[in-house]
Amino acid sequence: MTSRIAIVGAGPVGCAAAAFLARDGIAPALWSPTGRRVRRHAGRASFSCSGAVAGEVEVEWLASPERLAEFGVVLVCLPADAYASVLGPLNALWRPGQHVIVSGALSLAPLWIAAAAEGVQVSGWGTTLTTTHFQPDGSLHVNPLRSRIDMATVGPLDPSEARQLCADLFGDRFVAADNLLTPTLANINPIAHAAEVIPNLTRMEAGEAWSLFGHFTEVVGNMAEALDVERRAVAQGFGLEVPSLRQHYARSYHVPEGPLHTMAAAITANGMSPNGPASLQHRYVLEDAPFGLAFLEALGHAAGVRTPVLSACLGLLAVAYGRDFRADNFLLDALDIAGGGADALLARCAAAASPAS
């Protein structure tokens, strides 16, 4: 197992990954274009943690993105709306033999990276390692690691080797799929966040402090269930099965399966609910609408599966924000999602998950 791992992104997900690695005796390095959430001094970055990892965490800080070439493994923990501006330039820096892992990969980003970086192994996770958030005092609250993370890979490594590398770093929780579409469709964030934020847009606009799962009422649960039905129908349109939103919450928050609003109440009672967004300029919309909802809608069109609730959510958000979120996703054109139909896209993603010949 290599201990030379760098993390791109010093937000809550990147810092949480660094905290788990440091806890287990692996020395990660961090690079971010801003690093505003961490304290930096003399080539080191530090932050305080509570929850599943507690105490002060200190790691190496990389002063320039060029230094990422020094690391055999790079874990990308960026919101999808930073793919073009941050990840795009990095595609010119990857070197053959590196393993680039995209945490919570949206819109088939691993295909895009692999096309730009010959000889690089690129894996995509269907979700993040954990749920985590920065608290008002600046410390990071980290919840336990998820019990299951779906993944797929493209490049010279056998998929089982890529899975084992992830397991060596973060434990035996990774389920390797033979198609990159599987972890993409297993990502529940876009639909969950849409159901959570649309009824609470005025709270976001007013900058209120509100509990995300504390306000996950039966109405929100109804929206989330309907969106989940459409997500799984799109997966079935490609001949794929993915875990339900209920299963995901049970694995992520360690609560019994049941109606979604009941599960949300248990998550809140266990002290695991973060606050909801306190601004309209939040990734729950700016990332998840174009790179999640619009992408799911496009996959539905390719597979001949109707997604009326999902499309309605996109329409409501477009009116509220005054912007076309479908046009914000450059990967729809870059990967030619509409071209060739479902069979062609499925074949591309299946071939990508196999070792290169």
Image (cartoon, helix red, strand yellow):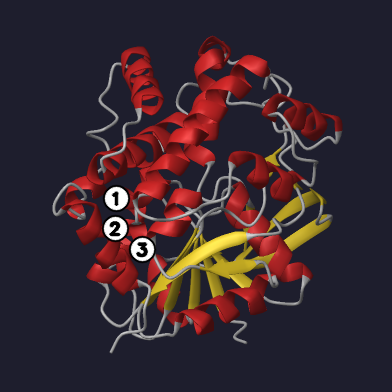
Q: Nearer the viewer, mark 3 or mark 1?
A: 3
Could you tell me how far apart the alpha carbons at marks 2 and 3 are, in whole angstroms? Answer: 12 Å
Q: Nearer the viewer, mark 2 or mark 3?
A: 3
User: Where in the figure is residue 258, as x and y percent of width and height?
Assistant: 74, 34
Task: Name the disc covering residue 144, or none.
Answer: none
Answer few, some or many: residues within 10 Å of disc 1's Cα (few below 14, many 20 plus, some between 14 and 19): few
Question: For this view, does 256 lie left or right of residue 352?
Answer: right
User: Where in the figure is residue 264, as x and y percent of width and height?
Assistant: 73, 29
User: Where in the figure is residue 86, as x and y percent of width and height?
Assistant: 35, 53
Task: Name the disc covering residue 110, or none.
Answer: 3
Q: Amino acid at mark 2?
A: Gly
Q: Amino acid at mark 1?
A: Ala
225 in relation to 30, above or below = above
Disc 2 + disc 3, Cβ < 8 Å: no
Could you tell me how far apart the alpha carbons at marks 1 and 2 are, in whole angstroms? Answer: 5 Å
* Quarter assignment of residue 294: top left
Q: Nearer the viewer, residue 235 or 78?
A: 235
Mark 2 or 3 closer to N-term? Answer: 2
Q: Residue at x 85, y 30 (%)?
A: 269
- Is residue 283 visible from the viewing direction of this image? no
- Is residue 248 visible from the viewing direction of this image? yes
Mark 3 or 1 closer to N-term? Answer: 1
99 in relation to 344, above or below = below
Task: Name the disc covering residue 88, or none.
Answer: 2
Disc 3 + disc 1, Cβ < 8 Å: no
Q: Which residue is mark 1?
A: 84
Q: Residue at x 40, y 40 (%)?
A: 292
User: Where in the figure is residue 279, as x and y percent of width and height?
Assistant: 52, 22
Disc 1 + disc 2, Cβ < 8 Å: yes
